[in-house]
Image (cartoon, rainbow, N blue to C red):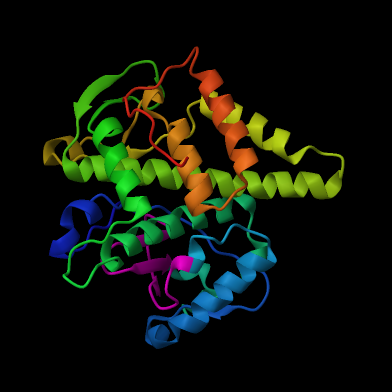
Amino acid sequence: MMSRPCLRERLLTFLLGLGLAHFVLLGYGPAFSASPSLSRDSDRIWEALLSQADALKLPTRFLHQLPPDFIHFEFEDLRSFAAEYHPGEHRLVLNRTLSFNAAGGTLRPLGRMAHRELQTLYHELFHAYMDYWGVGDQDGAGAVASNPLLDFAQGQRQCRYQEVLITPVVQRRSATETRFLTERESWEALNETWAVFVGWAIWTHLEVQKKAARNRHIDVTNEWVQRLRKADRDADLRGYYEPEDPTERTLTHKRFLAPQFRISPEEVAFLMDEVLGKERELIRKLVAVMEDNRRTQPLGGKCGSQGPK
């Protein structure tokens, strides 16, 4: 279920598209406090998280761009989700069961997390990253300053996430319907698509790292290529949005994009470079395998030649 608090007027159109995802934190290394009463200690909380992520050799390029006190960690007795991220308020609300001894004061460290749990954590942290650039990057006149992330996102939203195909029945991917998304819906569809990919990239990073540790002869780049080939071919990397129409929302809380509107090679190249800081040679090979898939599985939406040079 998406949590959507009031957003700052100056970036209403951008932030309305930021949704929530769910994640579970278990841990490794020194635990860090997440109590709302200790929000003034957010810099210490964030530094501990970064330290643990660095120790696990997880991508942290985009995390290091966030101020230490940007995300406010809280615990509540959530019923439907393991976590809720509230854009605008920058609150990450975790279920009390995810805290140490369910006390609602301290998270267990990161390293005992399963790979899928870390995947979901990074999904959430990417939402916070989008939230940060949506509200924090301003010039002295109060206007939104130019930023590669927002500039690229705006272009992709206009060409790929306004007129889309959805799968009304999730289990039947071949049955699609056309939707003309509102500005809020299109931002959310983009944001969730990108967060799905970032989470998948973290899971892949961990799986490949684990495999390479067991067999030093493993070709790490080839492992990435083969995993992305399958995920792209199976249309696993696609997003969703919550319908704005209240009547449609009574039928479903999520509308999933059709396979034709899965993430594009240009978006993957941008996220791997700007957000995750991956090597250009790996990015080039991943884009090549995605473009090869397009010979039999074309994409919807025409964006031209955007993305990093």
| Residue 82 visible in the current orientation | no
Q: Nearer the viewer, residue 228 or 27?
A: 228
Q: Is residue 82 magenta?
A: yes
Q: Is residue 229 above or below residue 102?
A: above
Residue 107: % across, % down: 54, 74
> Could you tell me which residue is drawn at 21 percent across and 39 percent down?
243
Q: Nearer the viewer, residue 166 or 82?
A: 166
Q: Residue at x 23, y 22 (%)?
A: 178
Q: Is residue 295 left or right of residue 142?
A: right
Q: Is residue 54 left or right of residue 88?
A: right
The tally of labels here is 0
Name the residue at 25% across, 67% down: 138
Span colored in magenta? 65-94
Horizontal and vertical percent for residue 69?
40, 78
Query: Compared with residue 229, is residue 128 higher up or lower down, i.e. above or below?
Result: below
Looking at the picture, how far across and down is residue 247, in whole percent?
12, 37
Q: Residue at x 50, y 13 (%)?
A: 295
| Residue 87 to residue 168: above or below | below
Residue 23 visible, this orientation: yes
In this picture, residue 294 sits left or right of residue 142: right
Q: Name the one closer to the observer, 63 or 45.
A: 63
**In the image as oriented, which residue stretches furthest toward the front?**
309
Quarter of the figure with residue 39 = bottom left
- Between 94 and 125, the one lying in front of the other is 125
- The stretch drawn in magenta includes residue 247: no
Q: Is residue 284 left or right of residue 216?
A: left
Q: Position of residue 37 (x, y in %)?
A: 38, 86
